[in-house]
């Protein structure tokens, strides 16, 4: 993510002031150390660590800053835009991404991709596929396979060689995720796997799958940023398009179907910046990434990323002479 910001800005000839996340500052600081060792001139890349209300706000308001690129929550982005004035901005924000599993999908592939789409990085991913719409005729079979796969995950620290499901980033996020799990239970959703803290130390949350979820439940509407999957039934393609789009977000989406014409037709109707067909979270530096609606504006990666750091200038010169 740091490279997504640095590469286009530097390629366009800009200098950069980068504020690290207060939750994960060390990796960015280490990259900054490598930048210095690589011989970048002093002042080209400047790294600061601090909190948003102090450090971040000062950067946004500083008259020497012409362009702001932000990755984070929609709420924080709203505050940034209030302080940015007329400065140019690009915003890569949150999501509540739908994954549509059609009745002609390869069920094993669909379960695997939904598993990757939601449980990657313990659900701490902006485009996490947290709303899984499964066609009614294969719903029970999908839930059974998905639950079995989630239960088989080895939970543990990343220092453990065989662990494939780690902790939430901190105590704040851990409590937030557990709160959403309790909200899902209290609103009538059925927890078929997980739903509890793992162990007594650390911020480990069990991979959790809910069924019997309706579109108006909190876990189906709000970004959880944790390992909580809501699996919902649908009957027709027309129905699922409406439901998938009934969200303030539009960052990512997935379509699982062996019928490429059907899958492309659905993808064309989903209002999201990235749509994966029979895959999920496949990224390429050549492919622009960004969101619709409250998931942000502007694109990162691809040739479009350079446009964020360039200005268009027209220079007019009068020409004299008979052949001008």
Image: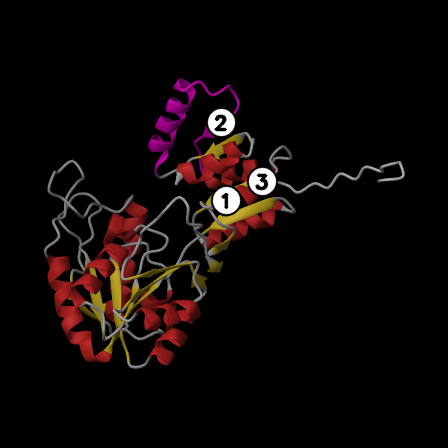
The image position of residue 206, as x and y in percent, is 17, 55
In the image, 65 versus 310, the foreground residue is 310
Mark 1: few/some/many CA within 10 Å (<14, 14-19, 20+):
many
Identify the image quadrant of residue 67: top right
In the image, 16 versus 49, the foreground residue is 16
The image position of residue 211, as x and y in percent, is 22, 71
Q: Is residue 222 above or below residue 22?
A: below
The residue that mark 2 highlights is 46
Identify the secondary structure beneath mark 2: strand
The residue that mark 3 highlights is 67
Q: Quadrant of the C terminus?
A: top right
Ranked by sequence position, the earlier of labels 2 and 3 is: 2
**Mark 2 vs mark 3, CA separation in Å:** 15 Å
Please, which colouring scheme is shown?
A: secondary structure
The image position of residue 174, as x and y in percent, is 27, 50
Q: Residue at x 46, y 46 (%)?
A: 300
Identify the secondary structure beneath mark 3: strand
The image position of residue 185, as x and y in percent, is 23, 68
The residue that mark 1 highlights is 305
Region of the chain picked out in magenta, as a range: 24-51
| In this rendering, position of residue 172 left or right of residue 163 | right
């Amino acid at each position: 993510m740091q490279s997504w910001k640095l590469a286009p800005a530097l390629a366009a000839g800009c200098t950069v002031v980068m504020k690290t996340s207060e939750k994960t500052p060390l990796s960015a600081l280490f990259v900054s150390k490598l930048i210095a060792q690589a011989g970048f001139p002093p002042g080209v890349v400047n790294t600061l660590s601090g909190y948003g209300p102090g450090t971040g706000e000062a950067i946004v308001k500083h008259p020497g800053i012409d362009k702001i690129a932000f990755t984070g929550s929609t709420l924080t982005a709203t505050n940034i835009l209030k302080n940015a004035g007329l400065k140019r901005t690009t915003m890569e924000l949150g999501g509540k991404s739908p994954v549509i599993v059609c009745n002609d999908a390869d069920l094993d592939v669909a379960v695997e991709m939904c598993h990757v789409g939601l449980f990657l990085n313990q659900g701490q991913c902006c485009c996490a596929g947290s709303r899984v719409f499964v066609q009614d005729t294969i719903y029970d079979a999908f839930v059974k396979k998905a639950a079995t796969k989630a239960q088989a995950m080895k939970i543990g620290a990343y220092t453990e060689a065989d662990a494939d499901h780690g902790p939430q980033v901190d105590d704040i996020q851990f409590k937030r995720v557990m709160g959403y799990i309790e909200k899902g239970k209290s609103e009538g959703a059925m927890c078929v796997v997980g739903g509890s803290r793992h162990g007594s130390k650390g911020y480990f949350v069990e991979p959790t799958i809910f069924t019997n979820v309706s579109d108006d439940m909190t876990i189906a509407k709000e970004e959880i940023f944790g390992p909580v999957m809501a699996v919902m039934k649908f009957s027709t393609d027309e129905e699922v398009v409406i439901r998938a789009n009934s969200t303030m977000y539009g960052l990512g989406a997935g379509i699982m179907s062996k019928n490429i014409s059907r899958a492309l037709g659905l993808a064309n109707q989903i209002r999201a910046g990235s749509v994966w067909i029979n895959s999920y979270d496949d990224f390429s530096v050549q492919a622009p990434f960004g969101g619709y609606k409250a998931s942000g504006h502007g694109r990162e990666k691809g040739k479009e990323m350079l446009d964020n750091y360039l200005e268009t200038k027209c220079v007019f010169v009068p020409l004299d002479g008979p052949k001008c």
